[in-house]
Amino acid sequence: MKTYLLSWNPEIWEWDDLDDEINTIKEKGFVEGRWSCGRTKIIKPGDYFFLIRLGKEPKGIFASGRIISDVYEDEHWNEERY
């Protein structure tokens, strides 16, 4: 299994339900979500990931987990770009 570093920059995208997801992790021990991984197609179920916060403080790795689905195409998360 491989490990990937996924990024989040709150100056580019506001994570409106982050507090709710943190509470879900506290209650259930995990949360399921989706994340853009660019154009890569090599991420597979079972792979590991770390999530790093960029931009404004506090910066750094703040989450980790396992990939649970194959990569798939969807609408771009930033409607202004596409």
Image (cartoon, rainbow, N blue to C red):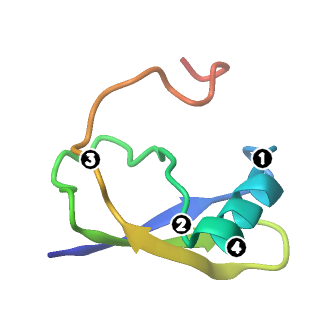
The residue indicated by pointer 4 is 26
Q: Where does the image place residue 11, in percent across and percent down from the top left?
A: 80, 52
Q: In percent of the image, x 70 and y 57: which residue is there?
A: 21
Which mark is nearer the camera, 1 or 2? 2
Compute the Cα span from label 4 to label 1. Answer: 14 Å
SS assignment at label 2:
loop
Which mark is nearer the camera, 3 or 4? 4
Q: Quadrant of the C terminus?
A: top right
| Mark nearer the N terminus (4 vs 1) | 1
- The label on residue 77 is none
SS assignment at label 4:
helix
Specify whether 17 is left or right of 43.
Answer: right
The residue indicated by pointer 3 is 69
Q: Along the line of sight, which residue is nearer the eye, 11 or 49?
A: 49
| Mark nearer the N terminus (3 vs 1) | 1
Q: Where does the image place residue 81, in percent across and percent down from the top left?
A: 59, 23
Specify whether 17 is left or right of 39.
Answer: right
SS assignment at label 1:
loop
Which mark is nearer the camera, 3 or 2? 2
Compute the Cα span from label 3 to label 2. Answer: 15 Å
- The label on residue 17 is 1
Q: In percent of the image, x 83 and y 68: which residue is there?
A: 56
The reply to whether callout 4 and callout 1 are in contact (CB within 8 Å) is no
Outermost residue toward the front in this view:
27
> Can you tell which quarter of the image residue 29 is in?
bottom right
